[in-house]
Every structure is written in structure tokens, then in C-alpha cells.
Amino acid sequence: MGVPLWMYLTVAAALFSIGMYGVLARRNAVAVLMGIELMLNAVNLNLIAFWRYQTPFNMSGQAFAAFVLVVAAAEVAVGLAIIIAVYRNRQSVEVEDVDMLKG
Amino acid sequence: MNFGEGLTPEAIAFGLFTLLTLGGAFGVVTTRNLVRGAIWLIVSLFGIAGFFVLLSAPFLASVQVLVYIGAIGILFSFAVMLTRGMTNLKERFNSQWWLAALAAVIAFMLLMVGVIIPVFGNTGAPVSDQVQTTVDLGVALVSGNQYVLPFEVASLLLTAAMIGAIVIAREDD
């Protein structure tokens, strides 16, 4: 193992920040979901890096990463279904156009 | 890792995967055409799969390729195609994009200061070269005193989410 832990953490932090920018700044809801996927992947990278460097004796890191993966799959399926339903009703997937709940 | 003394293959692979991951992520958040955005997302996820291989988690790497690149990438492509007319928005970012950029930069700084600086420069190797294998992961996921309950809850969640997605996206008639 030639690469130290902090390099993995730096890459994960950068990935998380880029994903966060995508979530906050993009107008298209599909692009927002893509940003969420990037953030979840950064979390997974952190989990696996810490698992490998700190606790490779038990499986908690990998198991948690697997659960994050399952939740991400569920989240993206429901999210895209909602986006498609919104597009069918409003002919738009711009986040700013979906303001029916605004008082 | 010392770049001066010659690159180890692992360091070269790390650099390559970093380039794929961060470059792909950058493409995802900046590209105007979302079809390209989906391709960039796949590039980025592939880089993450490479990191998993480097971190000796081969099962998760293959699951990453199958589930993320295979399933979620295709799902995003379908979503982009089903919402045609929105894939090429003239304005990519909302009016507060600079605020979002500021928040992202601050988040990165906070992560650096809070988490990475304490371990910065610590070139310590992992605590052990002995790594649990995929067999151990499988046992951990189904053994009674480890993760069998979260495992079942996760499968239930996945089923519920899939049924919910079908119900939400179905056309009312």
C-alpha cells in the first residue's frame, strides 16, 4: 500500500464538494440527482478507505458501503420516477418550476 | 508515497483513478447536455470502482460496475431521454450558482481542516495486510449476530422503492 489514507480522503472530499455544487446550482432536476449520486459515492469511498486502513479485520466498512449502495439505488429509482411524473404534469424538470407547495 | 523515488504502479493507478473520478464529476456538474452528463457520471463511477480495487474490496468494485454503471447509468440515460426538451437548458445554473460554489468551497475547506489535516502527512500503512475477503463479507451479511437484520431491511426497502417507483411513474388512465 503506497498511497496514504489522507489522499483517498482528499479525493473523496473533493468529489463530495463537486457533487454538492451540482446539487445546489443545477436547474435540471436530473442533474441534481446526478450530484447526489456523486456525493453518495464520495461517502462510499470514505467508508472503504477507512475500512481498509483502520479496521480490515471486520466487515463493518464494506457492509455499510453495500447498504449505502442499496439505498442509493432505491433513491435514484424513486427520484427519477418523481421527475418523470413531474415532467408529465408540468412539461418541465426545472427545479424552480416545481413550486406547487409554495404558499 | 514519494514521487521523487519513482512511481509505484499503485501510485500511477491512484492518479489515473483520481483523474477519472474528479474529471468525470466536473463534467457532470458543468456540461449543458445531460446525455453527456450521464456519460461523465459513468466515467466518474468507474474511477470509484478503480479505487475499490486499489483498496482491496473487489466485490464492491464489481457491484459498483454492475449496479452503478450498469443499472443507475442506464436509468439516468432513460430519464434524460424521457424528459427531452429539458436536456439542453440554455441556463445550466440557477441565479445563486456563485453562492453554491462558495458553499462547496467552504465545505471542502471544512473537510480538509476537520478530517484530513489531522491525518495529513501520516504515510502510515494500513494496520494490517491481512484483509477480509468476499467470503467474509457474505458471511457477515447473513450471520445472525452481524448484519442479517439490516440486510433484510435493505432488501425490503429496495422492493418497496421499486414498487413505489412504478406506482409514481405510471400513467393514470
Image (tube, grey):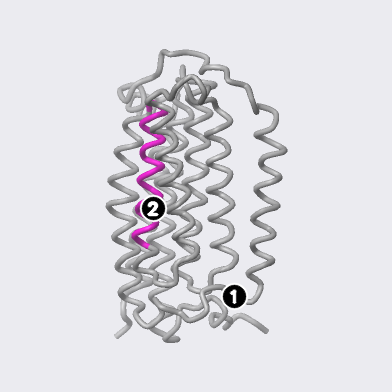
Decide: few, some or many residues near mark 1? Use Cα within 10 Å; few <14, some 14-19, many ≥20.
Answer: some
Tell me the chain of label 1: B
- Percent across and percent down for residue B153 are 42, 43
Q: Name the amino acid type tagged 2.
A: Ala
Horizontal side, residue B73 vs residue B7: left or right: left
Residue in the image at 55% along x and 33% along y? A7
The image position of residue A68, as x and y in percent, is 46, 44
Q: Residues within 10 Å of mark 2 (few under 14, many from 20)?
A: many
Distance between the Cα atoms at labels 2 and 1? 27 Å
A60 or B110, which lies in front? Answer: B110
| Disc sitting over residue A73 in the figure | 2
Q: Which numbered mark, 2 or 1, is in the foreground of this view?
A: 1
* Residue B110 picture quarter: top right
For residue B40, the mark is: none
Q: Which SS type dominates the magenta stretch?
A: helix
Quarter of the image where one finds residue B47: top left
Q: Residue at x 66, y 53 (%)?
A: B105
Give the residue at x 48% y 30%.
A61
Which stretch did the figure color magenta? Answer: B38-56
- Tag shown at residue B94: 1
Residue nearer the viewer, B139 or B94: B94
- In front of the other: B150 or B133: B133
Q: Amino acid at mark 1?
A: Asn
Quadrant the C terminus of chain B occupies: bottom left
Disc 1 element: loop
Q: Is label 2 in a helix, a strand or a loop?
A: helix
Q: Chain of mark 2?
A: A
Asked if residue B43 lies in the magenta stretch, the reply is: yes
Q: Is residue B148 above or below residue B166?
A: above
